[in-house]
Image (cartoon, rainbow, N blue to C red):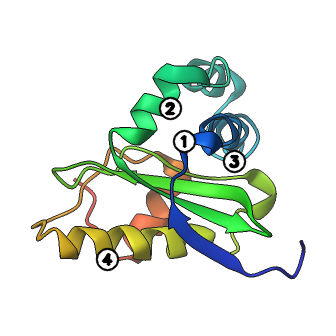
Amino acid sequence: MQNSPIEIGDFEASEADQLGVIFFDAVREGATEFYNIEQRQAWASKTPFGPNWASRLSAQKTVVARKAGLPVGFMTLDRVGYIDLAFVAPKHQRQGIGGKLYARIEELARAANMARLHSQASYLVRGLFEGQGWELV
């Protein structure tokens, strides 16, 4: 799995709970540089799972990064250009996966003729967006 290429594809409903674990671990373990434990616990008090979480992911365009067929990250885009979720598993962070996910989201946004993308980004992903030319408001 170490040398497997990253593949970006569409969300599959059967992966919803795995993406919940990625979200939880990215907040609790991957965001330690930016947020203290109380902030991370408030942000992710438990691992999201089940029908409500799957519906949240299905209601948006969700793209998934997979390595050796297993999800290692994901990003979502709603109908008005809002990126709601952007997370990569801690052991896969800072390897270009977020950039690959963003590139696919941008392709989808262009295909849908979206005038702009926006997000209420955390410090965890802010650098990725700024690296893509985003402006901080």
Name the residue tied to disc 1.
Answer: 13
Q: Position of residue 54 (x, y in %)?
A: 50, 32
> Disc 1 versus disc 3: distance between alpha carbons?
31 Å
> Disc 2 versus disc 1: distance between alpha carbons?
6 Å
**Badge number at residue 107:** 4
Q: Nearer the viewer, mark 4 or mark 1?
A: 1
In the depicted structure, whether residue 47 falls above or below residue 104: above
Q: Is residue 96 visible?
A: no
Q: Secondary structure at mark 2?
A: helix
Kindly identify the amino acid type of the residue bearing the numbered disc 3: Glu
Q: Position of residue 29 (x, y in %)?
A: 76, 41
* Chain-order first, disc 1 or disc 3: 1
Q: Secondary structure at mark 4?
A: helix
Name the residue tied to disc 2.
Answer: 54
* Chain-order first, disc 4 or disc 2: 2
> Disc 4 versus disc 2: distance between alpha carbons?
23 Å
**Badge number at residue 75:** none
